[in-house]
Amino acid sequence: MRTSLCAAAFLFAATTVARADGTCARDLLVAQSSQKTAIERLETLGDSDADRCRGWRQHVDTMRRAATVYGRCLSGAERSERLAQVQGSEKEFSELLRSRCKGR
């Protein structure tokens, strides 16, 4: 059963990349990696307001860039899911920036 799930996941990923042109394949990998790094970076933010605000700004920028790539390179349910994820995160951290980082 586990092997079937792995094979299905691989087939799905291969299909997604096959639909994308060469630029999209690369851009998707970069966007996914950047998104993962941004989430990990949030866990290591400093304690000062300036550190948090700087980290939140970087996170918002990363989520916006990822949304652009996902919107351009994906389709169907995967596109909807990925866009909802990054746009939700961007909205959440943009609100934090507006409410807690005025002038920082």
Image: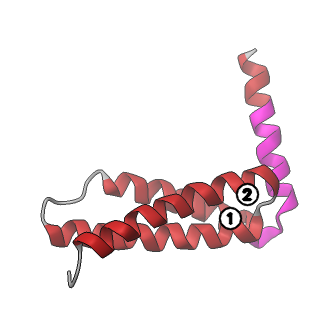
Left or right: 61 with respect to 20? left
Q: Residue at x 75, y 36 (%)?
A: 9
Q: Residue at x 17, y 60 (%)?
A: 46
Q: Is residue 92 above or below residue 103?
A: above
Which residue is at the far left? 48
Left or right: 24 with respect to 97? right
Secondary structure of the magenta portion, mostly?
helix
Q: Residue at x 50, y 62 (%)?
A: 34
Amino acid type at circle 2 is Arg
Give neighbour class at mark 2: few <14, some 14-19, many 20+ (Cα, 10 Å).
Answer: some
In the image, 39 versus 86, the foreground residue is 86
CB of mark 1 within 8 Å of CB of mark 2? yes
Q: Is residue 29 above or below residue 14?
A: below
Q: Residue 2 colored magenta?
A: no
Give neighbour class at mark 1: few <14, some 14-19, many 20+ (Cα, 10 Å).
Answer: many
- The residues bearing labels 1 and 2 have C-alpha atoms spaced at a distance of 6 Å
Specify start and end residues of the magenta stretch as a single range. Answer: 8-23
Q: Residue at x 85, y 49 (%)?
A: 15
Q: Which residue is mark 1?
A: 70
Q: Which residue is mark 2?
A: 79
Left or right: 26 with respect to 88? right
Ranked by sequence position, the earlier of labels 1 and 2 is: 1
Regarding mark 1 in the picture, which secondary structure is present there?
helix
Residue 95 quadrant: bottom left
